[in-house]
Image (cartoon, rainbow, N blue to C red):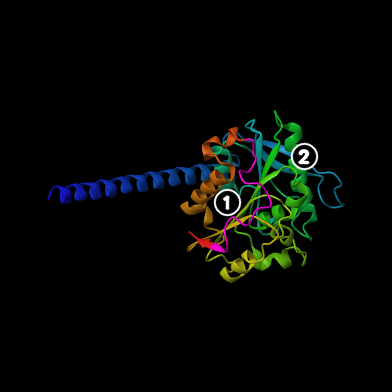
């Protein structure tokens, strides 16, 4: 009898605890969404300042600089966050971009830079140049200058960071690709393949890819086929969020939770301590993929 009473009390306590934890998660998510929505309206998040990023070798008709928002937190690890396709209205003020910057900057405490691409038309070379210029800018203006880099992008921006990653691999610690529009990659870049180097492991950094099962620009089948293309020791974790489409990922709890968990596993420290991290992944490059196939969350 005593054992039955103890079991019932334990079960009731566990249910109560689970309920409190669920309410706390929901409250944290709502607070985060309000912070991101406020930043969308104001154009900047806490700690950010407007900056102008010079880009060398600008082509005729393309500006010689990018506008951006920098939050210099003095961390040895910095993150550059890129936006969706500009000709369709994408910019550094996109909520998904702000959600990435919020997780890495506000929660992780690392220096963040989000900026507007100069041009989204063409084979993507100018966008890759913009990312490289953004890293050079961080190294020249931050005090102290960061030594390691996280490249994170949403939609078109995720493919651009995949494209630029091999040229920055000397400093690159991790890649984050949110909602990569894989089904439209060929027309976006005029049939130039910007993702194969990532699949071959040329970036030499662990990668996290997150897509929704209802994404309008990347079918589940295309995403799974992409996961099977990794070789050469490339380290990639591919997650699929149930029910999320291309535009609603930022409103769901799963991506932020999975990103925090992946960052903790990748750098071997809690997300809140990422600022003190040297930015070196725990596992050395060249290892087998972090996970086989696509995992649903």
Between the residue at mark 2 and the residue at mark 1, the CA separation in whole angstroms equals 24 Å
Q: Earlier in the sequence, mark 2 or mark 1?
A: 1
Residue 16 coordinates in the image, percent (x, y): 27, 46
Residue 53 coordinates in the image, percent (x, y): 76, 40
Residue depicted at 61% across the width and 43% down the height: 282
For the question of whether residue 176 can be seen, the reply is no
Residue 142 coordinates in the image, percent (x, y): 71, 31
The residue labelled by disc 2 is: 136
| SS for dot 2 | helix
Query: In this orientation, which residue lies closer to the viewer: 194 or 44?
Result: 194
Q: Main secondary structure of the magenta part?
A: loop
| SS for dot 1 | helix
Q: Which residues are magenta?
A: 278-294
Residue 126 coordinates in the image, percent (x, y): 79, 53
Quadrant of residue 47 within the rendered picture: top right
The residue labelled by disc 1 is: 96
* Residue 281 on the magenta span: yes
Query: In this orientation, which residue lies closer to the viewer: 80 or 86?
Result: 80
Residue lying at the far left in this picture: please name it: 1
Q: Is residue 297 left or right of residue 139?
A: left
């Amino acid at each position: 009898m005593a054992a039955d009473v103890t079991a019932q009390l334990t079960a009731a306590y566990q249910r109560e605890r689970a309920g409190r934890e669920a309410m706390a998660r929901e409250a944290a998510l709502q607070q985060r969404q309000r912070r991101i929505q406020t930043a969308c309206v104001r154009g900047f998040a806490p700690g950010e300042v407007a900056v102008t990023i010079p880009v060398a070798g600008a082509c005729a008709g393309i500006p010689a600089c990018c506008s951006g928002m920098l939050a210099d937190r003095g961390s040895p690890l910095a993150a550059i966050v890129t936006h969706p396709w500009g000709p369709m209205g994408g910019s550094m003020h996109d909520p998904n971009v702000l959600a990435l910057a919020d997780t890495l900057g506000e929660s992780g405490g690392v220096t963040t830079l989000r900026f507007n691409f100069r041009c989204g038309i063409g084979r993507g070379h100018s966008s890759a140049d913009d990312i490289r210029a953004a890293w050079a800018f961080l190294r020249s203006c931050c005090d102290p200058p960061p030594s390691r880099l996280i490249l994170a992008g949403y939609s078109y921006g995720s493919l651009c960071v995949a494209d630029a990653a091999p040229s920055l691999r000397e400093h690159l610690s991790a890649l984050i690709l949110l909602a990569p529009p894989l089904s439209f990659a060929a027309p976006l870049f005029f049939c130039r393949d910007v993702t194969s180097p990532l699949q071959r492991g040329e970036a030499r950094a662990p990668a996290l890819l997150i897509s929704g099962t209802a994404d309008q620009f990347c079918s589940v089948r295309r995403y799974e086929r992409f996961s099977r293309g990794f070789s050469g020791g490339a380290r990639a974790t591919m997650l699929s969020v149930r029910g999320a489409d291309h535009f609603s990922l930022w409103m769901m709890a799963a991506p932020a939770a999975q990103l925090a968990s992946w960052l903790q596993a990748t750098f071997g420290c809690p997300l809140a301590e990422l600022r003190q991290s040297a930015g070196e992944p725990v596992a050395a490059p060249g290892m087998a993929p972090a996970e086989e196939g696509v995992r649903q969350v």
